[in-house]
Amino acid sequence: MGDLVTARLLLHPLNAEEAERVLTGNPEDAARWAPGYPAEGDASAAKRFLRTCTSTGDPQPFGTYVIRRREDGRAIGGVDFHGRPDENGSVTIGYGLISSAHGKGYASEALRALLTFARTQGVSSVQGDTGRDNIASQHVMTAVGMRLVAEDDRLRYYRIAWDDSMEKAGSES
């Protein structure tokens, strides 16, 4: 599977060797990681990815993607599916960027690309959550069309769903 490409970013599907490098903090080529990468969230995603590889095999295309800037190829964060779609065609996503990449629209751009990709793979809905005090992440999810569907004392839960049955019905007439 190849990279997902946006105007400014490459979303590179993580493989097991790269995940191990994220966990050890040893890049194959130091010039490929921006200062501050990998962050704690990247390490968590790499662990989850490797656990999945061990238990059920490589989860791609529903795995982890390294977010790289196209201008210099440097890793600045990650975006991932927390598993394959469930029986209803729903997936959960997560994302994060290193501090120096905040506030530039990269998270929205990466998440928008992942949502578009999910839809092309037959996913019917995507959900994610964020801390109640993480206003920036809340803005990212609403910017890409996700809507607040629930909240508790710790988290806010967002979701986007597509009903392609109308489009399919219209194309058959």
Image: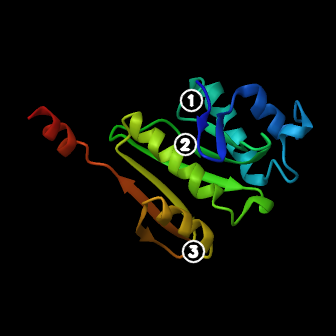
**Eyeballing the image, is 155 above or below 112?**
below
Q: Position of residue 106 (x, y in %)?
A: 65, 56
The foreground one among 123 and 100 is 100
Residue density around tag 1, few if under 14, some if 14–19, many if 20 or more, within 10 Å: some
Picture quarter containing residue 28?
top right
Residue beneath disc 2: 81
Question: Taking 118 as reference, is 167 left or right?
Answer: left
**Farthest residue in the left direction?**
173
Q: Amino acid at mark 3?
A: Arg
Q: Amino acid at mark 2?
A: Phe
Give me the residue at 68% from left, 62% from top. Answer: 104
Specify how the rendered protein is coloured.
Answer: rainbow
**Eyeballing the image, is 20 above or below 143?**
above
Quick one: SS at disc 1? loop
Mark 3–mark 2 distance (CA, rounded to whole Å):
21 Å
Residue density around tag 2, few if under 14, some if 14–19, many if 20 or more, within 10 Å: many
Picture quarter containing residue 70?
top right
**Quarter containing the N terminus:** top right
Quick one: SS at disc 3? loop
Quick one: SS at disc 2? strand
Give me the residue at 80% from left, 32% from top. Answer: 20
Residue beneath disc 3: 132
Question: Taking 58 as reference, is 17 left or right?
Answer: right
**Eyeballing the image, is 97 above or below 28?**
below
